[in-house]
Amino acid sequence: MHWHDLSATVQHDAKRTLVNFFAGALGAARHPDLTALAAVLETFSGPREATVIGRGARLDALSAATLNAVSANLLDYDDTHLPTVIHPAAPVAPPVLALAERHHATGADVLLALLLGVEVACRIGNAVSPQHYARGWHITATCGIFGAAAAAAKLLRLSPEHTAHALAMAASQAAGVVENLPHGAKNIGVGHAARNGFFAALMAAQGYTGAPAALEGPYGWARACGDTLQQERLLADLGAQWEASKNTFKPYPCGIVMHAVIDACFALRAQYHVAAAQIAAVLVRGDALLLARGDRLVRNAREARVSIQHCVAAPFLWGKAGGDEFAEARVLSDAAMAFRTLVRAELDASLPMGAATVIVRTHAGDTYEATVVHARGSLAHPLSDAELEAKVSAAASGSMPAHDIEQSLAMLWQLQNLTTIQPLMALVAGRDAVAVP
């Protein structure tokens, strides 16, 4: 398959995924956790052949891919394939970009490899959903590694046989658990999905082999994880319908299942002009996934990004739900801690996944209610290209001058015309960013 074989719609969807990826990676480029990881990887780095996004540094390709995957996932601002809740670009795009720098791939080759990697990750996710995630496997990492391997194999121009071996080797390295979602270990899992998928493709290129049924066999990855691979879902309409075109992009840096909660709170503010000081109690109703992932105490910024309680607090306290509202200073403020105690969550089995109802009771005894079924950023209510650009610009403001941000966005929308991505990567490295220690 070649880039020009794809429809204009699918091509544009691939570009949107890459644009959104850079928003997440640039937004977290200077995060202390990324600095700590960079310090560890620098100790063992090989040739400085690939860009660490937003940090003004280069490392070996495997290490750069790891760092860029962690940064893309760190602020919970990454893309989401809603049927599986996979965030596919975080593990898939970094090895593609690192390999492209290493092998001087064209922009069209990068976009095609990214698209195919996202497709593989999401189709494998379909084939084990919903049990896989519900059982406790962090599906972005466990399925993302297959997307990383497939994308790297495409850029390395591996044969179908060698690509199958890469996927088989990825099966022995797929890991990540949901229990770690509010901790840095989650991001490390995604970083290793990128690194290990990349590594699997490199080893397949050197002749290493894996079992033909490493995914679906009686002792393969799916069954080892407790599932039977649903091959009809894996292969349905392959080449005709693209799972990658079902990718969505977040307007808020938090867990995707919280977005309807935030939208409902904004709707209540706008319609009834209810202020935080007026509120006596808030009830949030949602499906089992929302409660399982988001009904929690908050002790740090990571937990706030997967907290129903904080996702109610932010719109009412500050009228916004952006990066600042999920940063440590506001998360641990007296106002936020007090407001979160007013919020209670309960199951509403009638609501579909991704929907939420918010009911506010005021001190005066008034009750206001709003239900959001399709959150902003979903397929039914997608972010526009202009909104994606604004997301990148805001995220990159701490790492790149405004002119460089504008230039990089122009290159991304026309990436298929670039004979090499080196000019783009030189820009997104960040002129004034901190160097890797």
Image (tube, rainbow, N blue to C red):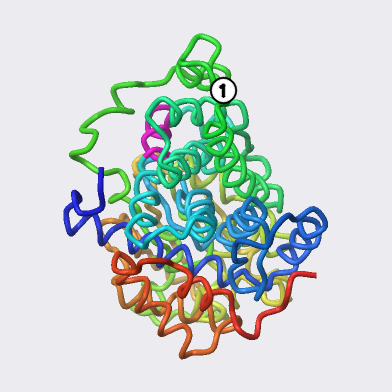
Give how far across and how far down residue 5 sits, in percent: 18, 49
How many numbered marks appear?
A: 1
**Left or right: where 144 falls relative to 35:** left
Q: Is 124 left or right of 374, judged from the image as shown?
A: right
Membership of 122 in magenta stretch: yes
Which quadrant of the rendered structure holds the C terminus? bottom right
Q: Position of residue 345 (x, y in %)?
A: 53, 51
* Image height of 151 relative to 237, above or below: below
Counting from the top left corner in percent of width and height, residue 289 is at 48, 42
Residue 130 sits in quarter = top left
Residue at 52 percent of width and 16 percent of height? 211
Q: What is the span of residues highlighted in magenta in the rendered image?
A: 120-129
Residue occupying image coordinates x 49% and y 20%: 227
* Whether residue 125 is situated above or below residue 101 in the rendered picture: above
The kind of secondary structure element at disc 1 is: loop
Q: Residue at x 48, y 49 (%)?
A: 92
Q: Amino acid at mark 1?
A: Cys
State left or right for residue 61 relative to residue 217.
right
Asked if residue 215 shows in the view, the reply is: yes
Q: Residues within 10 Å of mark 1 (few under 14, many from 20)?
A: some
Q: Residue at x 32, y 48 (%)?
A: 244
Residue at the spot of label 1: 225
Which quarter of the figure is the N terminus placed in? top left
Can the viewer see residue 395? no
From this view, report whether residue 51 is shown above or below residue 100.
Answer: below
Report whether 21 appears left or right of 350: right
Residue 204 screen position, x and y as percent = 53, 31
Q: Is residue 86 magenta?
A: no
Q: Nearer the viewer, residue 236 or 329?
A: 236
